[in-house]
Amino acid sequence: MSGILNIVIDSLKTIYEIKKIHVNSTISQRRVRAELISNPVKAFYDENCIIPSDPAAYEKGEDLYDVFVKFCNIKKSYILSYKEFIKKLKKEHDAAEGRVRIQDKNGKERRIRVLFNIRLLTDDEKKKRDEEE
Protein backbone atom coordinates (compact mmCIF):
# COMPACT_ATOMS: atom_id res chain seq x y z
CA MET A 1 0.00 0.00 0.00
CA SER A 2 2.81 2.42 0.83
CA GLY A 3 4.36 1.73 -2.60
CA ILE A 4 1.22 2.99 -4.33
CA LEU A 5 1.17 6.07 -2.10
CA ASN A 6 4.79 6.82 -3.04
CA ILE A 7 3.95 6.60 -6.76
CA VAL A 8 1.01 8.99 -6.31
CA ILE A 9 3.14 11.47 -4.34
CA ASP A 10 5.88 11.38 -7.00
CA SER A 11 3.30 11.96 -9.71
CA LEU A 12 1.80 14.90 -7.81
CA LYS A 13 5.27 16.44 -7.38
CA THR A 14 5.83 16.19 -11.14
CA ILE A 15 2.45 17.75 -11.89
CA TYR A 16 3.16 20.58 -9.45
CA GLU A 17 6.61 21.27 -10.94
CA ILE A 18 5.60 21.35 -14.61
CA LYS A 19 2.12 22.79 -13.96
CA LYS A 20 0.61 20.50 -16.54
CA ILE A 21 -0.94 17.05 -16.79
CA HIS A 22 -0.10 14.99 -19.85
CA VAL A 23 -2.79 12.58 -20.96
CA ASN A 24 -1.92 10.22 -23.81
CA SER A 25 -5.39 10.07 -25.29
CA THR A 26 -8.97 10.56 -24.32
CA ILE A 27 -11.59 7.87 -24.27
CA SER A 28 -13.28 9.30 -27.36
CA GLN A 29 -9.98 9.28 -29.27
CA ARG A 30 -9.45 5.65 -28.29
CA ARG A 31 -13.00 4.80 -29.35
CA VAL A 32 -12.47 6.42 -32.77
CA ARG A 33 -9.19 4.56 -33.21
CA ALA A 34 -10.80 1.24 -32.23
CA GLU A 35 -13.60 1.80 -34.74
CA LEU A 36 -11.06 2.65 -37.43
CA ILE A 37 -9.15 -0.56 -36.78
CA SER A 38 -12.23 -2.77 -36.57
CA ASN A 39 -14.10 -1.29 -39.53
CA PRO A 40 -12.15 1.13 -41.73
CA VAL A 41 -14.98 1.31 -44.29
CA LYS A 42 -17.46 2.59 -41.69
CA ALA A 43 -14.93 5.12 -40.39
CA PHE A 44 -14.30 6.27 -43.97
CA TYR A 45 -18.02 6.52 -44.72
CA ASP A 46 -18.78 8.46 -41.54
CA GLU A 47 -16.05 11.00 -42.27
CA ASN A 48 -16.27 11.34 -46.06
CA CYS A 49 -19.69 10.34 -47.40
CA ILE A 50 -23.38 11.20 -47.23
CA ILE A 51 -26.58 9.90 -48.75
CA PRO A 52 -27.44 12.19 -51.67
CA SER A 53 -30.86 13.79 -51.95
CA ASP A 54 -31.05 12.79 -55.63
CA PRO A 55 -31.55 9.00 -55.94
CA ALA A 56 -29.99 9.06 -59.42
CA ALA A 57 -26.74 10.54 -58.07
CA TYR A 58 -23.73 8.26 -58.06
CA GLU A 59 -20.01 8.07 -57.42
CA LYS A 60 -17.49 6.15 -59.46
CA GLY A 61 -16.26 3.10 -57.64
CA GLU A 62 -12.67 4.00 -58.58
CA ASP A 63 -13.02 7.50 -57.11
CA LEU A 64 -14.44 6.18 -53.86
CA TYR A 65 -11.67 3.62 -53.56
CA ASP A 66 -8.94 6.20 -54.28
CA VAL A 67 -10.26 8.45 -51.50
CA PHE A 68 -10.54 5.40 -49.20
CA VAL A 69 -6.88 4.46 -49.82
CA LYS A 70 -5.76 8.04 -49.07
CA PHE A 71 -7.91 8.03 -45.93
CA CYS A 72 -6.35 4.75 -44.74
CA ASN A 73 -2.84 5.98 -45.47
CA ILE A 74 -3.40 9.16 -43.48
CA LYS A 75 -4.99 7.28 -40.58
CA LYS A 76 -2.42 4.46 -40.82
CA SER A 77 -5.15 1.88 -41.16
CA TYR A 78 -5.47 -1.41 -42.99
CA ILE A 79 -6.43 -1.03 -46.67
CA LEU A 80 -9.02 -3.46 -47.96
CA SER A 81 -9.01 -4.68 -51.54
CA TYR A 82 -11.28 -2.92 -54.03
CA LYS A 83 -13.71 -5.86 -54.06
CA GLU A 84 -13.95 -6.03 -50.27
CA PHE A 85 -14.36 -2.27 -50.02
CA ILE A 86 -17.25 -2.23 -52.51
CA LYS A 87 -18.85 -5.28 -50.89
CA LYS A 88 -18.81 -3.63 -47.44
CA LEU A 89 -20.20 -0.35 -48.78
CA LYS A 90 -23.07 -2.20 -50.42
CA LYS A 91 -23.82 -4.34 -47.38
CA GLU A 92 -23.39 -1.81 -44.56
CA HIS A 93 -24.47 1.45 -46.20
CA ASP A 94 -27.14 0.44 -48.71
CA ALA A 95 -25.08 1.51 -51.71
CA ALA A 96 -26.36 0.00 -54.95
CA GLU A 97 -23.88 -1.02 -57.62
CA GLY A 98 -24.54 -0.32 -61.26
CA ARG A 99 -23.01 0.78 -64.53
CA VAL A 100 -23.48 4.02 -66.42
CA ARG A 101 -22.37 5.16 -69.84
CA ILE A 102 -20.07 8.18 -69.98
CA GLN A 103 -17.95 9.81 -72.63
CA ASP A 104 -14.23 10.00 -72.01
CA LYS A 105 -11.93 12.86 -73.06
CA ASN A 106 -11.76 11.57 -76.62
CA GLY A 107 -15.53 11.46 -76.99
CA LYS A 108 -15.56 7.67 -76.85
CA GLU A 109 -18.46 6.19 -74.91
CA ARG A 110 -17.68 3.62 -72.24
CA ARG A 111 -19.42 1.96 -69.30
CA ILE A 112 -18.08 2.43 -65.81
CA ARG A 113 -18.93 0.84 -62.48
CA VAL A 114 -20.66 3.22 -60.07
CA LEU A 115 -22.34 3.17 -56.69
CA PHE A 116 -25.73 4.79 -56.19
CA ASN A 117 -27.06 6.15 -52.89
CA ILE A 118 -23.65 7.49 -51.85
CA ARG A 119 -21.81 10.77 -52.40
CA LEU A 120 -18.40 12.05 -51.35
CA LEU A 121 -18.40 15.21 -49.28
CA THR A 122 -16.52 18.21 -50.64
CA ASP A 123 -13.89 19.88 -48.48
CA ASP A 124 -16.25 22.82 -47.87
CA GLU A 125 -19.02 20.47 -46.72
CA LYS A 126 -16.60 18.75 -44.32
CA LYS A 127 -15.52 22.09 -42.84
CA LYS A 128 -19.12 23.18 -42.39
CA ARG A 129 -20.04 19.87 -40.74
CA ASP A 130 -17.04 20.08 -38.40
CA GLU A 131 -17.91 23.64 -37.40
CA GLU A 132 -21.47 22.59 -36.54
CA GLU A 133 -20.23 19.81 -34.25
Image (cartoon, grey):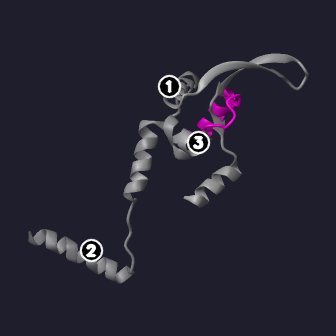
Q: Relative to residue 61, is residue 73 drawn left or right?
A: left
Name which residue type carries label 2: Ser
Name the residue that disc number 3 marks: 71
Where residue 68 sits, quadrant-wise, is top right
Q: What element carries label 3?
A: helix
Position of residue 38 measured from the top left corner of the image (x, y, whole percent): 41, 37
Position of residue 105 measured from the top left corner of the image (x, y, whole percent): 88, 26
Query: In percent of the image, x 64 and y 26: which residue is there?
Result: 115
Name the residue that disc number 2 marks: 11
N-terminal label among 1 and 3:
3
User: Crowding at label 1, few (<14), some or many (≥20) Cα neighbours within 10 Å?
Assistant: few
Is 132 in front, or is 80? 132
| C-alpha span from label 1 to label 3 | 20 Å
Name the residue that disc number 1 marks: 91
Q: What stretch is highlighted in magenta?
A: 51-73
Mark 2 and mark 1 residues within 8 Å of each other at the beta carbon: no
Name which residue type carries label 3: Phe
Tell me the tag on residue 79. none
Position of residue 82 measured from the top left corner of the image (x, y, whole percent): 58, 25
Query: In percent of the image, x 39 and y 76: which residue is there?
Result: 20
Q: What element carries label 1?
A: helix
Q: Residue furthest left?
A: 1
User: Crowding at label 3, few (<14), some or many (≥20) Cα neighbours within 10 Å?
Assistant: some
| C-alpha span from label 2 to label 3 | 38 Å
Query: How many labels, in total?
Result: 3
Mark 2 and mark 3 residues within 8 Å of each other at the beta carbon: no
Name which residue type carries label 1: Lys
